[in-house]
Image (spheres, coloured by chain):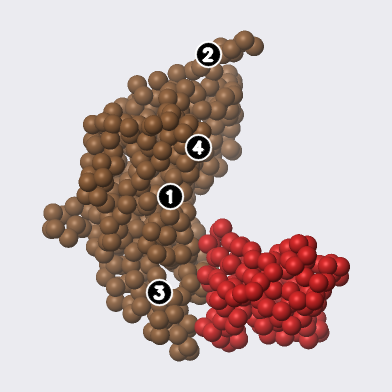
Chain colours: A red, B brown
Amino acid sequence: MNAEEMYQEIILDHYRQKHHAGLREPFSCQVSHVNPTCGDEVEMRVRLDGGVVADVSYDAVGCSISQASTSVMSDLVIGKTVRDSFALFEEFTELMHSRGELSAEQVDALEADLEDAIAFVGVAKFPARIKCALLGWAAFKDAAWQAVESGQSVAKKVSPHG
Amino acid sequence: MAYDVEAIRADFPILRRQVNGYPLAYLDSANTSQKPQAVIDAVAAHYLEHNANVARAMHTLGGEATEAFEGARGKVADFIGAASPQEVVFTKNASEALNLAAHTLGAGIGEGDEIVVSVMEHHSNIVAWQLLCQRTGAKLRWFDVTEDGRLDLERARAEALINEHTRIVSLAWVSNVLGTVNPVAEVGAWAHSVGANFVVDASQGVPHLPTDVAALGADLLAFTGHKLLGPTGVGVLWGRYDLLDSLPPFLGGGEMIEIVRMTGSTYARPPHRFEAGTPPIAQAVGLGAAIDYLNGVGVENVAAHERELTGYALERLAEVDGLRILGPRGVFAPDGSGQVVRGGAISFTLATRDGLEIHPHDLMQLLDGRGIAVRGGHHCARPLHERLGLQTSSRASIYLYSTVAEIDRLVSGLCYVRDFFGGRR
């Protein structure tokens, strides 16, 4: 696989036009994550409402993979329950660690849940870039989990692993 | 005799490699250099025929290993104009050498003292001193850079950056990001005028420029073997012998001692005082072979080749729309004095025609796909990038084996990357 194939049109579109970018009020929890090896940074806010991810907003700098992945992630999780969003996190992580060895059926199954985020499947073949794709997801999970823990959500009983 | 870059390339087996279906264009030598066959052979021969511990093993192999290790020390000493091999301390890398300097010079530092570095330093020449300041209460101060990426001496003079409180000044000879060749002798003289010690981070200098530690005005000078055609795992701290002899040990352990009693120990004279434990023996032997190789080519010839190629690269890169070079735009001072003001590490940013800044990791990924190796990131110099208002940059860096054709491939690769992200596919 050449590098060009990793940069799917959908990734470039999100990189050029990020969805849900910019920090917004109100929010339940804010976190800051960095990737020290490349300097990518994300400030992320999550607002929970009754066990549902009501809003995700962020201020981020970094490569196209990290920026687009954060944008696609926010599209996916907003409106989902915390439980479902954490299940998506697990599926996306599985996709990233697949080394590109998933069967067509496995990719199709993941795509049913991950929607546009399936476009990042090629990143799994470039080990140095996996952490780029996971930066925004990790920040989201951290912020949402902290919000749940600190009682900033009605749904205190939700566990991150279902 | 004309510089024969193809003959030199033939000595570096890795340069014959294909990467992603293209011949390798290795433009990351400021990160680490490639190794000539002679260095690979020297390390192999050491393990195949002479391996033993040094200074402790009294048998034949021990004698051979010690002779080879101490011989390498002598080669390093000659290479940098040291007064004697006893001024050369082997460490594991330049970072350890700088930490050694900070720990030992730091023995007499306290509150009210000041340590001066610059904002263009590699993290290793910042953090070691920050840690010293934390331990002692001393204050860290730093040189700024000018808009064109030179050390801002004028501002430093106006602010009396170096003054009667200054105890240590530590400065890069050549910047690993901007390529800037700093006026180290001038800063050294200033440091000495207030009684401060002057430490030089020569990691990007010694591999590329003829080195004379006395002319540089250094009291201590650090560099690493792997950027100088040698193996990883061996670095050097050179020090004036009288200064080294006045400093306390750094790490405690084998071979750095004189007499050990349970009630207390006395320490060896330099350089062994600072070389606790089994040193990087084969690596030092490899570094010695690297120095022999460079001496064979002639460091002055290497420097001339790099000046010419850097000038060519700066010219070609300036033609790329959307590309901004960080640091000096020319090899020589604009005043026509003929003074060399930059080396062959060229950092830059690249934007698409509609103004989208292309992230260095995206840039290097697409270049790598065409066999071109560059570095993207903050190059272990985050404070400098922050000062320049940047998150990161991309860097192409050359060495004695780099060619005009590789620069041409870089330039056309960059135009391709720019247009790829600009939607012109």
The crowding category of the residue bearing disc 4, from other C-alpha atoms within 10 Å (few below 14, some 14 to 19, many at least 20), is few
Q: Is residue B345 left or right of residue B277?
A: left
Element assignment for label 3:
strand
Residue B134 badge: 4
Q: What SS does tag 1 mark?
A: loop
Please state if B345 lies on the left or on the right of B152 as rendered: right
Real-space CA distance between mark 4 and mark 3, rounded to the nearest whole angstrom = 38 Å
Residue type (three-letter) at the residue carrying disc 3: Leu
User: Is label 2 in contact with label 1 (beta carbons under 8 Å)?
Assistant: no
Circle 3 Cα neighbour tier, 10 Å, few/some/many (<14 / 14–19 / ≥20):
many
- Label 2 amino acid? Thr
Residue B31: in sight, yes or no? no
Residue B346 x %, y %: 35, 62
Q: Chain of mark 3?
A: B
Q: Earlier in the sequence, mark 1 or mark 4?
A: 1
Q: In the image, which disc is placed on residue B207?
A: none
Q: As rendered, which of B35 and B340 lies closer to the eye?
A: B340
Viewed as shown, does residue B376 lie left or right of A50?
left
Q: Which residue bears the numbered disc 1?
A: B122
Distance between the alpha carbons at the discs numbered 1 and 4: 19 Å
Tell me which chain the residue with mark 2 is part of.
B
Answer with mark 2 or mark 1, whichever residue precedes in sequence.
1
User: Which element is circle 2 on?
Assistant: strand
The residue type indicated by label 1 comes to His
Q: CA distance from mark 3 to mark 2?
A: 57 Å
Q: Return the x and y of residue B320 as percentages of the image width and height.
A: 33, 77
**Quarter where residue A152 is shown:** bottom right
- Image position of B250 with respect to B322: above or below: above
Would you identify the image quadrant in which residue B59 lies? top right
